[in-house]
Amino acid sequence: MDWQPLWLTFRLATITSLILLVLALPLAYWLAFGKFRARGIVEAVIGMPLVLPPSVIGFYLLLAFSPSYSFGAFIEKVFGLRLVFSFPGLVIASVLYSLPFMVYPIRAGLQSLPASLREASYTLGKSERETFFRILLPNCKPAVLTAFVLTFAHTVGEFGVVLMIGGNIPGVTKVASVAIYNEVEALNYAAANQYALVLFAITFVILLIVYSINNNLLRVRQSS
Amino acid sequence: MSDNLLDINIRHSLHTAHGTLPMEVVFTLKQGNILAVTGPSGAGKTTLLKQIAGLINPQSGKITFDGQVWFDDTTKKSFPPQLRNTGFVFQDYALFPHFTVEENLSFALQKEDDKSIVTELLEATGLTQLAGRKPFQLSGGQQQRVALARALVRKPRLLLLDEPFAALDYAMRYSLQALLLKFRQQFRFSIIIVTHDIGELFRLADQVIVMDHGKIEKAGTPAELFIQENTSTQDFIIHGEVLACTKQNNQLHVSALIENKIRMLTLPLHFETELIPGNNFTLHYPLDSAQIRLITPS
């Protein structure tokens, strides 16, 4: 079996999840507590990947990334990066595609904390930033863990967007889900099954670990 | 230095279960005094405390603390809560669940602060033995003591307490009220306390304001508000806690804890909905009529 597509899949999922964690923390905080009017618009935009067919997102990203259009040309000129049919392009697409899976659970976690925790921290002289990192974040660990794993799993399961903007270049954009599709197209069911089984097993184990950890955390909380 | 510590003159829109109410509060807290704020729930008492602490900005008006402007809508000035140096004890205590008792206290320290205050406060509140415990391993009274000690770490000049002792039994309440008064002597702060407990109000407060629907209904000393009004008719006032109720012959027989003794009261049946076991009550027996009134079921 060629392990490269699997290795590529998990590399993509790890990088995407880490980037999203950094992006989603301030975004989730802002959505949870910020005072602004455009909240509905921002929420709608973030939530689009949940309902849109991946091919729609893939199609527009393909247009945007293509060097024949202004954004793609700009990126290529300034950063020397070509985003279509490349790994960096896949990472950016995955970040957009999985954004709601990271932002929403963290926002929900933050909102479920009693407001008095934040307020107490402020009256004890602590800034918003310090309150966020020392009080709010440690108390919504289950939410952050869930968000991270959902994002990771969602990226592992990505297919349509990858196919649209990444294509099928071995070692560059050919991730496991695409490899399975190729093998099935070639009527090579045994190979497809090997990839599928590995994805199946790993995804199951990851989710199992997360839910066990979260249940334990919840039990500790409830016993109080 | 003027005698007035805190001058408040604010207007706000109060969002309650019954819609939006205009809130308007004007009062002055004297240096070193204890002010009790009482009134039915939804009257705006907690909102008022949070406005003083800087957690909520009033829509208009002015708050001045010892000559320093904390809030003024005309100059768009709002002093952030971090700099107001008020101690706030929340109704739900708001202890940080992931910190131990000691960490909850030392979180309040600023870099340059002397750490010995934490040890001192742990000792004074009898929490030294529990310093390594997490909040969920503590009883309600212990949690309350942590919240109080934590609010004092920064040596605030004004302590804001939002129904701090409401969830505690009488004995615990007495001992914490005594502790609070002891701390006040030691640290010399002024206090604004929201309370429903008339006994507490008498034990602690120099000034009282009664709020309802966002406005101050009455203000004065506890005696002026709750005794003089009633002494003219030589009424009886009984505070207690309902333990059990039974109905018999169209009357309500209430077993109640009154001044630490269990008493039996026989009352008209219509009190049934308010006198529920576990509730505190204040009964008003006007001697010139047979009408018994319930003043403040909490």
Image (tube, rainbow, N blue to C red):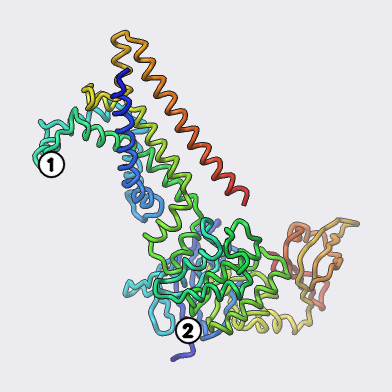
Residue at the farthest bottom position: B1
**Dot 1: what SS?**
helix
Residue A165 appears in view: no
Label drawn at residue B5? 2
Give the answer, above or below, for where A99 lies relative to B108.
Answer: above
Q: What amino acid is labelled 1 in the image?
A: Phe
Q: Residue at x 26, y 35 (%)?
A: A91
- In the figure, residue A5 lies in which quadrant? top left
Expressed as whole percent of the image width and height from the top left, the position of residue A214 reads 52, 41
Q: Nearer the viewer, residue A91 or B229?
A: A91
Horizontal arrangement in the rendering, residue B40 relative to residue A213 (left or right):
right
Judge by depth and name the residue closer to the eye, B95 or A42: B95
Chain of the residue under the numbered disc 1 shown in the image: A
CA–CA distance in space, label 1 to label 2: 61 Å
Please, is residue B119 above or below residue A104 in the view? below
- Residue B103 in view: yes
